[in-house]
Every structure is written in C-alpha cells, then in structure tokens.
Amino acid sequence: MTTYTEEYRELVAETPRGAVTAAFREEVAAVVSPGGLISEPAQLHTYECDGLTGYRVTPALVVLPATTEEVAAVVRLCARHRIPFVARGAGTGLSGGALPVADGIVIGLARMRKMLSVDVDNQRAVVQPGVTNAGISAAVGGHDLYFAPDPSSQIVCTIGGNVAENSGGAHCLKYGFTTNHVLALTFVTPDGDVVTLGGDSTDQLGPDLRAVVLGSEGTLGIVTEITVRLLRRPEAVRTLVADFPDAEQAGNAVSDLVAAGIVPAAVEMLDELAIEACEKAVQAGYTLGSPAALVVELDGVEAEVEEEFERVQEICRRNASTHIRIAGDPVERAKVWKGRKAAFAAMGRISPDYFVQDGVIPRTKLGSTLTRIREMSDAAGLRVANVFHAGDGNLHPLVLYDAAVPGQAEQAEHLATAIVELCVEQGGSITGEHGVGSDKACSMVKMFGPDDLTVMARIRAAFDPQGLCNPGKVLPTPRLCGERPGPYRPHPLESAGIIERL
Amino acid sequence: MTLVNSTSVAVERPESVTEAADLLRGTDGPLLFRGAGTKQAWAGRPVEPALVVETGRLSSVLAYNPADMTVAVGAGMPLRDLQDLLGEKGQWLALDPSTESAGATVGGLLGTGDSGPRRLRYGALRDLVIGVTLVLSDGTVARGGGTVIKNVAGYDLPKLLYGSLGTLGLVAEVVLRLHPRPAATATATVQVPVDEAGELALRLAASPLEPAAVDWGDVDGGLLAVRFEGTPAGVEGRRSAAGELLGGAAGVEWRTGADEETVWQRLAEGHRPEEEETLAVAGTLPGRTADVAWALSEAAEASGVRTALASRPALGLHTARFAGAPAAVGAAVTAWRERVLAMGGSVLLRDRPAAVDAEVDAVGPPPSSVGLLRSLHRRLDPHGRCAPGRLGSWLPHPAPGEDRDRS
Amino acid sequence: MTDISRDEDQRVSVQPVAIGNGAGVFDLHHPPSDELISDCVHCGFCLPTCPTYALWGEEMDSPRGRIYLMKLGKEGKVPLDDTYTQHFDMCLGCMACVTACPSGVQYDKLIEAVRPQLERNRRRSLTDRLFRGMIFALFPYPSRLRVAAVLGELYRRLGLRSLLHRTGLVSLLPRRLQAVEALMPPAKLRHLATRTPAVTLAVGTTRRRVGFLTGCVQRVFFADVNQATVRVLTAEGCEVVAPPTQRCCGALSEHAGREPEALDRARGLIDAFAEVEVDTIVANVAGCGSTLKEYGRLLRDDPDYADRAAAFSAKVQDVSELLAELGPVAERHPIEARLAYHDACHLGHAQGVRSQPRDVLRTIPGLQVTDIPEAEICCGSAGIYNLVHPEPAEELGRRKVDNVLSVKPDALATANPGCLLQIRRYWPGELPMFHPVELLDASIRGVDPIAAATARSGRPRLDARTAEPGSF
C-alpha cells in the first residue's frame, strides 16, 4: 500500500503562514492601481470558487493588478509576509485550480487583458494573461492567423488559465495543446522576481522550464505575459456530423479513421443525453434521439481535405452510420461547434446538478470503456451523459444528479470517481485537460507512485520553497487526503456491490 | 566523437531501470549518461566522470499498440531501429535529425533536443514525448506523463527533460506519440541565396500550403528545398501554387523518390561537422534569416575563418560550421553570438575541437531564469553528480550546498 | 469600484444577517427564486458579454457574480448595504448574459426580482432620490417632455448651450446633469404638435389590424419614426389603431425596480388597448416592447389583471417581427449604402429578435446590412443608465462607437431611441442614423435618406452633438 514518503511529507508540509492584516492590506493597496483591491466580504464571496462550485473558500483579499510589476510587487509582499496566493483568470476551471486559500489572497489577472503585440511575419503574438483564448484568434483573424488550442470555454477562458492548465480542446488531436503553442513566458517567481522562460529561439539550452511551468496549474509562479505561436488558417475545413446506432459503432469508426492514416483536426463524440442537452441550449441541428454522434472535422490543403473527407464518410457508412450531415457553410459549421462547446454548461438544461469528469483512455479502449460506464451508471441508478474528444481518448462523462435528493450528490461523486479510476486502470489518465486542481489532487496517487510524487514535490519546492503559490493543488497532501491515500482502497460503491473493477 | 577517453572511467550498461537505479544509488562521484554518443560534445564540456552509464541495453520496445499510435521504448533504442519497427505498421516517430544515421538514441535525442527539418510540421521531440522514466542520481525512479497522448496530470516531467543534456538524471524510458507515415511526398527545390530563402520561408508560412520542411543549404550555390507531405492528391494539388510562390516554374525543380531523398541527405550534411570543425546553432525569429547570415559572414571575415551556413529559415534555426585556428574560431563564434543575442536570439555551441573551449563560452550568458534552473537542479541532483560542467557557468560545479540561489 | 475596507478587523469575516423569513436579506414579496439561482452552474460563459465585466473585470460585477450575490443574500450571509446593492445598480439590464448562457439561466427574471427588493428595502441617498425622482417625473409624461423639449430647443437656439460649453460652465454641472444635457435630443418643433391618428386604414387589402404603442420619448422626440411606422404598416396591409388614451408603458420604471409605478402603468396601458379590437400590438421601441411582453409576469399577482395581462403580452410584437412575419407586399426602391445594424439589447437579448430586423432591412434593394464587432455588448444607454451612471456609460458608448467605426458604415440603424442618442453622443462626426422602419418607409416612398444626409452634411463634423443627425 502506498504511503507518502518521509521526504514527500516534508516537501509538502505547510510552513507557518502570516495573516492578512489591515497593515498588509495597506501595503498591497500601495502597490496596485486604484480600484485593484477588493476587500468587502460580500465581494470576496464572489471569488470563493471557479467553474467547480463544489469547493469554496473565501479569500482574505482579492487583488486585480494591472501590470507585471504590480503582480511582482504583490507577490513580493506575500513572500515577505508568508501569505499564500492563488492566481485566477476568468475562473472557468473545472478542477478547482483557482480555489482560494483561507487567509490567502487571490491575484486576479482579469484586468491584464491587452494584446501587447502581434508579429504577423513571424506568426506570433505577445499577450497579457487576461486575454481570452478566442480573443487572440479574433485579434489576428484579419491576417489569416489563429491560435490553435481551443478549449470549449474559449470564448471566456483566458490564455493565462490555458497556460496554467495546458489546455487542449477539440482540435488538439492534430494541433497539440497550449504547451505546443507557447514560445515564451514572462514569469513572476514565488519570491516576486520577474524572469523570462523561452524566447525567440525554438532551441533553448538546458531543461525546459517553460514546459514545466505550462500545465503546473499556478503552483510554480504567475505568468504575466505570453508569447503565443499563431498558425496560418487552413485553406479548407470540412465538418460532418455522423449519427450512429450506438457508441461502440462510433468508436469503431474512430479506430478505422486512425487506421486509415487520417489525422482529423477533431473527432468528437456525443451520446444521446449530451445531444439532448446541446440541442436544448443552442439548436445546433444534432439528431435528437440518436444514440451517438461523431463530429469529424478535417482541415488543411483543399485537395487533401476533399480526398480524405470522402474516405471519412465511407468509413462512417461502413460502421453503420445512420445519417451523415455535412456542414455546408461556415455558419452551419460554427453552429455544430457551438453546440458541442456548450455541452457542459448545457447540462443545466437536463439536470439540476452534474459532475464532469476528464479521464483519458487509450483510444482503442473506447468501446469497452463506454460499455463499462453504462453498466456502472445503470447499477448506480444515475444518468451519465458522455461528450468527449474521441480522437485522443479524452472522456468527459457527466454524472447527472439532483443535489436536492439526499445522498445523491455523494453517490454521484463516487460514481464519477469510479469512472476516473476505471480510466487509470485502462492505462489512461485522471485528467486530459481540466487539470488536477483541488478536485483530483487526492487521485494523483492512482496514477503516480510515491517516488513519482516526491520528484514532483521537489520540482515544486525548487520554485516555491515557502509553499505559498497555490498550495493544496495538484499534489496530494496528508492533510487533504489522509495519511494513507492507498490506490486500491475499496470504493464505497464497490463495497456495496454496485460497481466492480475490471 | 567520444569525449571520455580515459581508461580509468568505469562504463556500465544496465539492463533494467532497477539495475540503473541501483547503480546510481550505489556509487559516488560525477556521472555521465550516454546513448550512442553522437552529441557528447554539445554545450559545455563535462568534467571527467567517475561512471559512464550507457543506455545501450535499455533498448527494448516496452509497449507498442499501433492503433493507439503510441510507443514506449527504452531510452537506448536507436531512432533508426524504432523507425524500422514503426514503418511496418505505416507509422513513424515524426523526427528526422541528422544524427539518426549515426545511431542516435531516443533518450539522447530527448536530452539534447536534437531535431530535423520536419520539425516545422510535427514539432520537436518536446512535442512528441508523452511519458518518461527518470532515474535521479540518488537512485530515485520517477515516472512522469503517461502513455496517452492527452494528459495533464502532474508536472510535465517529460518535456522538462527536453534539452536537459543529462543534467537532471538518467532518462531510462520514453513514451512517444506517433504519426501515420504520409502516403506521398514531394520536394520543390530552387536555387536562391540565403536571404531570399528567408523571404520565401516567410511567404510559405503565410500561405496555406503547410510545408513539412523548408531547408536552405550552401549546396550548388545555395539551395532551398521545400517538402510537401500528405495524400497523393494533396501533394499534387500544391504543386502549382507552390511553384508560383517559389518564383515561377522556370527555377523550380520537383523531386520525388530517390532524387528527393538525396537532396535531403545533402542538406543534412550541412548540420554535421567535419573533423576539426566547430558547429554552432543560432535560434532567432524566422524573419531574421538574412540578418543571421550577414552577421555570420561579417564575423567570419573579421576573424579570418571559413564558415558554412545551413538554415531552417521557417523555424529560425541556423547551423554554422567554422573551420580555422581555435582562437579565430572562438572570436568568430563570439562575434556572431553577440550579433544574434542583440537580435533576441541565442547561439549554442555544439561539436568542436577541445581547443576551442578555451576561446569561447560554450553556453553563453545565462538567461534571467538561471536562478530557477539552479534551484531545480539542486532539488533533483543535490550533489551535482549529473554531467557537471555540461551547462557551463549556468550550473556551477561543484554545486554549492545551500538551498537557494535565485539572484 | 472598491476600496480598502475600513474595519480594523485582522481577518475578513462574514457578517451574518439573520432574518428568519427564508429569504435572507430580501422580503417575501417575490425574492429571487432559489430554482432560478441554482440554474447557474458558474461556467462563466456570460462574462465576455457583460458590459460591466468588460469594463472592470470584477467577479461581483458580472452576471455570474451577481447571481452569486443573490444567493448569498438569499442565504442571509451578507448585509443589504451599499456595497451589496451597488453591484445590482451597476447592471445595465442589457440581458446579453441571457443570450450567452448555455444553461438557460433566466437572469432577466432574477434581476427584475432583485431590483424592486432593493428599491423597497434600502434607502438611497437624497441626491440619488432627487435625481431619479426628476427622471421619473419627466420621461414617462409626453406632455411634460414636450415642455422640456421646447425649453431644450430654446436653450439651444438662444445660444445658451454653446455659451455653457464655450465657457466650460457645463463642466461645473454634476456628471449626471451633464449627461442629461448632452443626451437631450434636438426636437423638431413641428413634431411636438404631431399626434398619431387613432385609426389609419390599410393601403389595399387589410391583412391585419394592429394596435400601435406610440411611446413617450418616441412620440415627442422621434415623431418621424412613429409616422414612418404607421406608413410602413399601412403600406404592408395593416390597419393601425393607436388608442389616444395610451400613456407610458412603465418600461423605465420596471427596469429601475420601481415596481408599483410600473404595475400601475401596465394596468393603464392594458385598459387603453382594451377598448380596441386588434390582432397584434406593435411596438417600435425595443425597451417598451420587451416590457410589454413581460406584462403577464409583472401582473401575475393581480387577480383582476393577471389573465388580461398574459393575453396582452401574447399579442405584442416588435414592428420588425410583424413585418418579417407578414412578408413584403409594397414595392421597395433601392437605397445604395452600407448600413451597420446595431442590436438594441432590449430587442436582441431581451426579446431574441435579431434576424427579423436584418431580414426586413435586406428587403431593400442595394442596402448592404453589416454587423458590428462586439455586437452583443451594450452601448451603455440602457434606459436611464447613462443618466444615473454616466461614467461607465461613457466608456461603453465610446467602445461601441469604436466598433461601429471599424466597419466603416454609411449609416447606422437601430430600433431603440436610447441607443441612437448614446451612439450619437460619442460619434466623432456625422453619421446618418435611422430606425429600421424609417429606411423601409423611405424605400417604399422611393427616397434615399442616406444619400440625402450625406450630401447635406458635406464634410463630417467633429461635434456630433451639435449636428442634426440623419432624419432624427
């Protein structure tokens, strides 16, 4: 049974912390622009959670700096007074990565939302962290350029948050994740130093610090400027929605696409419940009642896209697709995507509450995993909607429940956890794009052994020896997760005979 | 080129991760990790190690499921062998470094960040690595990443190791994402000087043609090669637009088959040093190609050394080979570096005769983040055993005992 | 927006407000409902379309944050003090968040439940009360507005306005009065006497009998629009009935949370239209139309009016909705121009009427209808918002103008007089501005008002406020 190593315990131990006093507030007020300090209780409450509302902690103070210098000055004060701090973008994260720390401060980057420069020739832009993901593409669209990572929340989530989470999106199957599209970072270290990671050159000497900061969920420092790589808009884009009689058939179609050597820009799958929610929200034209639908998008050079698009349709038909709808124009294509991208939030239309998971499985295990999820869902008596990035095996099962029914929330949480653990057992991951955050910190032990975690804790301590930078996230701590977060503790549902492991 | 010639150095070839961990745990003194040894002279010159750990026997395929398009291999797996294996399933690791033919290993390629022309389309190994097993100098075995292409659980240890040059520990196992082998490929070549190649590279990048590689080499008086890959119709369909962009049908030659591969072999030569040559790589914004070339020719002229340039203008990577007396070469590299640094880029020293070391700093001035680098290094390799000297002044050795050094 | 808290307490603490009625800080008369509050899943999709979030980037000045505050209020976890209420006061009520929300949160119902609570349960400062009192004693009364308009014209024509501006004396006025001064539209004196006839017969076959809401500001300052509306409707086969007894519809009061006033006005209007038999009730002002469509909900507790109000609301259509539904019969003549169409929030977001005005405009040959970037973000007019919160309204107005400028239009069309006044105030030159029905009217009559306005204006002038805009 796994336990924390002594070294690990020492590395994640909470060091004594200071308190947010009136004097500290005055000091902070002196270094941020007017209006950049929020301290009224009612206002602070609105910062107590991000997109994951299950965890709430009211911060002692919220600071909205306007410049890198202001961020650094605030962080220096935190370092000096040993006040924990949590960076926050738009607060749309789904893993509680921006959950405040009690008696700590939130450093909101929402006011740092300038596009600092766009270099069309070299296809890059320098942006502040509060710029929205979609805002970057909108700003450079006139030059036929765009920023490739496209998380579903792209109209609202910020690039700073994308950097923290290493966000993906529907199109990362072909184009990669945020980490593949960020060339340089201006980074405020947990002592308040301002350094640059990465640079003009794609060849950097030494360990890739930029890469370890990307996806570190705000636990290593605060990014205040981001140089992003922009891509030339593809010449042709073709999108179809294919309905299937069941998820297995749809999964087989995905496998056949891959086997045919096709790398689609995106392959998304929605099941019947997800289709229902999306249609209620945006009327995107998905077939209500279809047990499964695949959204397949190809992009690239015209002749190539046309050639492969024919093959995609053929493969869908061969796998018993009941209906293929081809998006005839950009408006229709946008509609298809609007439906898909609103999927999570649209769950509110069919269920009062839901848990969303973010497990990853090897693509080849798609069909069998979906069957297992259905069995588990039936056994638990809870509905599970599935919407996921089928191309890269990133599942987003949405466990639907009603918090007003006593006990149902706990039951749903257990089912959600069991699904994620199922993913790990299949050789996958607990999170494909939402991050570990507060939500899955204790699940890290399902994926990583004590030594793996110790090395991660060493990395963290190298950046943040005082443990002030977004503490309690990513890495499990004995305080949060108990002394022995063994990977194979029998699950309550398992003990109750509701689920069983493969 | 082999760096370690001393007969007193022990060389071990562990057969398993456990064995490697035991080996590191059970020894003291400086370590050097080695795959095929094709890039031992890159960056700073490490001190003489007490133990060389070779990965030659950590070379098996640990897991390969073609339908998942991922493969897990021992770090000592030569890229060449891996490509043969993957080729049977119509797949490949989308990496084509010039050291492949010399037997470069997957682990070594990750540690050195070596890449080839098709980095333009597929990214570097940084973009292809999804999991890793790292053995620290104290014998701790840590896994990072995973076996699926999409995964954000925990810190990105695999990418952290990209370019780490063996300074953080021994890369023992690597998990990689794969690509389908393109069904068709064709290369357009046009004879142009380097500055024009730089312009054309920008125009190609601004076009929707999606070239897989854009390389310029000092062959036949300056040759720009642009490779297109994809479906047969896709490659064919790009011909007219690409030809037009490259300056009209007259100057453009299309090459396929053996003819095409020959061109790329010849261009790869430009990235390999001849005996006694010094090789350095500049990285800049893509738009700086002409400036880099001009700075190089001025530096060469002032120092009286012979230089040759091979450029990947769309990537902003430029390999320069210097031949001449060590002092003159040192002066030329230094002068070139100053100019490139002034334009926001960097110059990294790779292969060179030992005598050049005294004349030029292999790693150049430290970046603003060097404090973090030192802090990280101290946490992962507290006794400074891993290739001390490799990162020159950036990671002084022996490592100071105190914990933090940021400023 | 915020300042350092003055309390010397070392830790920030929550002051629980114990009101044991189950509604927290709210009273029991329709507090925001828990079901509606719980619809919000906190996804944040509303943030980019919220004008105050766009300005300040503060969670509590976003729809999501405001719903969170409602929840806290409902739970009695925060006091109903100035800090709490200012965030609702700052909401423009543009309802862009309703459009953006994938979960279908009915923020419109929520904010409309909160505003009367705040009006009832919190005492505003004396100056605030006086200012609001002045607005509500003036705008809903066409007769008083006409007097104000005459005075305004005198002020303008006697040179007092330019004197005040030249001498800088205007800057001595409080910001809110400056806003009133700057927004006050120039009235055409001949229009002040214009009344819409009680009945106007259809041209040709009568396709529908419609009731017409003539509006308050609309009938005084934009009588042209009303005349154009009647002409277009009759040309398209409608018999137009405008009950002369109709008074203010209560929209301004409703949006400001002055519930009793709003309900009285709603009853009055229902009574006024009760006397005429019509198939449809048409509004040409977005803000009025959206409130008319809400009468059923507003009067749900009134046993005498609940059913009548619901029946009334069911008949209400914006003029563009009706025209799109009827389809064109009257011949159109070309207007060659590039027209930017600005979605009034109370038409686009509150009523969901977006395609109809565009479709109707596109029936005009030669007219190129373009959208504006950030179309979903409010221009800052928002009923009386630009009068009571002039600073944020100005920022939003300038932002909207920049966006309109970016599409380089020959003219602008929007279906709300407030938007027109607001955009015109910050426009750096002269831009012909129209209500969509005016362009239709012109097209049917065979005139080209855009060309006429452009020719009349010659070179663009810098102070738009002194210029006579388009046909307004």
Image (cartoon, grey):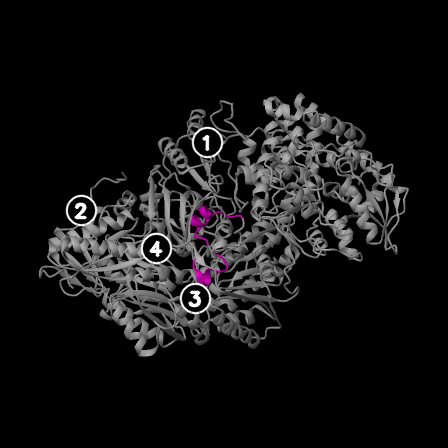
Which amino acid lies under the numbered mark 3 shown in the image of this protein? Leu
Q: Nearer the viewer, mark 4 or mark 1?
A: 4
How many neighbours does mark 2 have within 10 angstroms: few (below 14), some (14-19), or many (20 or more)? some
Between the C-alphas of marks 2 and 1, the distance is 44 Å
Under circle 2, the secondary element is: loop
Query: What is the x, y in percent for residue C18?
Result: 64, 29
Q: Residue A436, percent across and down?
A: 45, 50
Mark 4–mark 3 contact, CB under 8 Å?
no
Q: Nearer the viewer, mark 3 or mark 2?
A: 3
Q: Which of pointers 2 and 1 indicates the residue nearer the eye?
A: 1
Give me the residue at 47% from left, 36% from top.
Answer: A64
Number of marks in the rendered image: 4
Query: Which tag, 2 or 4, sits closer to the chain's start?
Result: 4
Whether marks 4 and 1 lie on the same chain:
no
Secondary structure of the residue carrying tag 3 is loop
- Compared across the picture, whether C297 is left or right of A126 comes to right
Residue that label 3 marks: B209
From the viewer's perspective, is residue A96 above or below residue A1? above
| Labels 3, 1: one chain | no
Q: Position of residue A218 (x, y in %)?
A: 41, 45
**Numbered tag placed on residue B287 in the rendering:** 4
Closer to the camera in the image, C374 or C226: C226
Q: Disc 4: which chain?
A: B
Find numbered disc 4 in the image and state the secondary structure of the residue it sits on: helix
